[in-house]
Amino acid sequence: MDYNLISADNHILEPPETYIERVPKNLRDQAPRIMRGSDGGDGWSLDGTPPKQTFGLDAVGAIAGQNYDEYRNKGIRWEEVLPGNYEGAAHIKDNQADGVDAAAIYCSMWTKNIYYDLTDRNLALHCVRAYNDWLIDDFCSTDPDRLFSLPILPVNDGVPAAVAEAERVIAKGGRGLFLPLSDVPYHDPQYDPLWKVAVDAGVPVTIHRTGVSRQETAAKTASNSSIPGLYVAESTVQRFFSAVGPISNLIFTGLFDRFPALVFVAAEVNCSWLPALAQQMDQSYERQQKWAELTFNAVPSSYLGKNVFVTIVDDFLGYKLANDDSVLASAAMFSSDYPHSQTLWPRSKEYIAEMTMGMSEDTKNQILFINAARVYSLPD
């Protein structure tokens, strides 16, 4: 099919029966399920008690249609959630209404929380498989040319478990591998077997608005809940800059020299900061490479747009800079971020018209669909 606009970062909410129906029978009584919370909204319960957190910013962007006065950070009931969150055909329909031809599908924060917070690790691993099976077999199977599945990997249960799940989901048709925050940062060489699986299969590995350390991120989340404004500052504003550490760490530890064909995506981080990072990396490489005995021989910025990509939402400055920066233009990929609070849906076409005003057609096409087509190995 022809692609003119690809969203490289969309999301979903798995339906209530996902885990109850898909984990082994002996685990179904303990499986996560959607329940009503004390605030009147619904959320995932991991232990049969009302959820501490209910649906909010992970769905409100689509529900409110960018009417920011109607945003809620909690208290949304399942019946309010648009079917495009959990039905592949409805998701495609919502994309088409927004002018989007195809989308890469990331999980919600709930999926990650289920994996992180379940103390029964056997159940947690079965939940990972249940989600991935639903994503590939039910949601994205509606039209795999329009919905690119990014199954989650159980990275905190050891590299062998992550490799086994990667091989399993790739065999089922997974289009990429989503890496949640890990207790061991991804620049650690222990992950080399996982990178080999990705390279051999020709699929990208991706992170989503995550920093270097899971413990560091958890500490921030715990500390920002009681001070007005701090949650927005740390969990929204600062997370757009969260890829600086992972990208520079992976490049400077020589990952892309060990695996020259590996493709790494940092999602929902925008790109206007990327030229500054490229400049600093190149300067540091020039001045520090001898004494530091660096294990790679190319200027760091040369990996951008070849091995490293980012997804961007309404980054007006980033689009402006990309018109004069070929490296930036080769690394940035448009996203609508449906259905989250940052989403451009259902006005992506309006935003694109404004952000690309005066931009060359070649640069515009790179950001809107060509780079994503390279990342996901779409046919010419």
Image: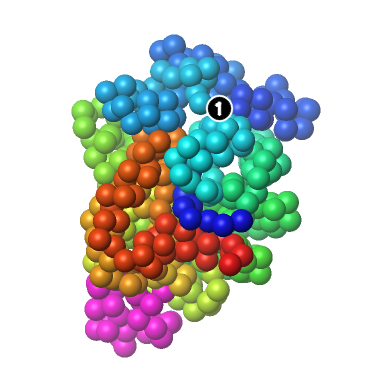
Quadrant of the rendered image containing residue 273: bottom left
Q: Is residue 280 left or right of residue 333?
A: left
Indicate the position of residue 194 as horizontal and vertical percent values: 61, 63
**Direction right: furthest residue:** 25
Residue 300 among those drawn in magenta: yes
Residue on which disc 1 sits: 83
Residue in the image at 35% along x and 81% along y: 299
* Range drawn in magenta: 277-303
Q: Quadrant of the C terminus?
A: bottom right
Q: Residues within 10 Å of mark 1 (few under 14, many from 20)?
A: some
346 falls in the magenta region: no
Task: Locate residue 185, reporting x and y percent.
Answer: 45, 58
Whether residue 148 sits left or right of residue 53 in the image: it is right
Can residue 253 be seen here?
no
Examine the rendered structure and indicate whether residue 10 appears above or below residue 291: above
- Residue 40 can be seen, yes or no: yes
Query: In this picture, is 304 found above or below 344?
Result: below
Instruction: Identify the residue shown where x is 77% and y is 27%.
Output: 26
Question: What colouring does the structure picture have?
Answer: rainbow
Residue closest to the eye, 343 or 261: 343
Q: Is residue 248 left or right of residue 125?
A: left
Q: Residue at x 58, y 32 (%)?
A: 90
**Residue 92 occupies which quadrant of the picture?**
top right
Q: Residue at x 27, y 84 (%)?
A: 286
The one of 273 and 357 positioned closer to us in this rendering: 357
